[in-house]
Structure formats: C-alpha cells, structure tokens
Amino acid sequence: MNKSDLIGKMASDAGITKIQAQAALNSFISATTGALKADDKVILVGFGTFSTTTRSARKGRNPQTGKEIDIAEKKVVRFKAGAELSENVK
C-alpha cells in the first residue's frame, strides 16, 4: 500500500473526501516528524511507538574500493509495534 492508497482507504472508511484525508495524513506525518526531531516519543496505544536513538560512530568499508571509512554518529528512527498490532497481524 502506498500513500495514495492509504489516503483513499482513510477517506472511504471515515466518510470524508480524499483532500481531507490527505490533509489529516500530512498533519500526522508533520506532527510525528516534529516530535521525533525534538527527541520526543510518539506513542499510539495499541499500534506502536515511534522513537529516536543515536547510532554511534563506527568504521566501515567502501564496497567498491575496500578502503576503510569513518561513518559518523547519527540519529535514527525506531518503531516498536504495540501488542494489539502484533496480535492482529498474526
């Protein structure tokens, strides 16, 4: 399912237009992104938790040349599925 499929499904399930569903989805994405940038968690009970963690700096290899390179520390997004979502997917 891609973004436009999700918007269509949201619109039909909620009885709203696709424009309204797109606005709601874009608002959710924007709010989630803002919270994660501020190192907050986004907890959706029953669905899951979005959070950030820091991946430490490490050494790597360039696959083309085999030369060792330094990979910088960076912040990465994590998602942990909630119990209800996990159970419903089984």
Image: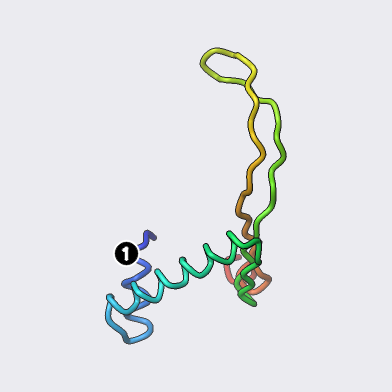
Spot occupied by residue 14 in the image (x, y as percentages of width and height): 37, 85
Q: Foreground residue, 19 or 71? A: 71
On the image, numbered disc 1 is attached to which residue?
A: 4
Spot occupied by residue 8 in the image (x, y as percentages of width and height): 31, 72
Q: Is residue 26 above or below residue 60?
A: below
Q: Say left or right for 76 vs 56.
A: left
The C terminus lies in quadrant: bottom right
Q: Residue furthest front?
A: 38
Question: What's the residue at 65%, 26% (across, down)?
Answer: 70
Spot occupied by residue 19 in the image (x, y as percentages of width and height): 27, 76
Q: Residue furthest bottom?
A: 15
Question: What's the residue at 64%, 64% (across, down)?
Answer: 81
The N terminus lies in quadrant: bottom left
Q: Foreground residue, 69 or 45? A: 69
Corner quadrant of residue 79 = bottom right
Q: Is residue 20 above or below residue 3?
A: below
Spot occupied by residue 36 in the image (x, y as percentages of width and height): 59, 61
Corner quadrant of residue 66 = top right
Question: What's the residue at 63%, 48% (across, down)?
Answer: 75
Q: Residues within 10 Å of mark 1 (few under 14, many from 20)?
A: few
Per the image, label 1 sits on a secondary structure element best described as helix
Q: Is residue 15 above or below residue 49?
A: below
Question: What's the residue at 50%, 70% (across, down)?
Answer: 31
Corner quadrant of residue 67 = top right
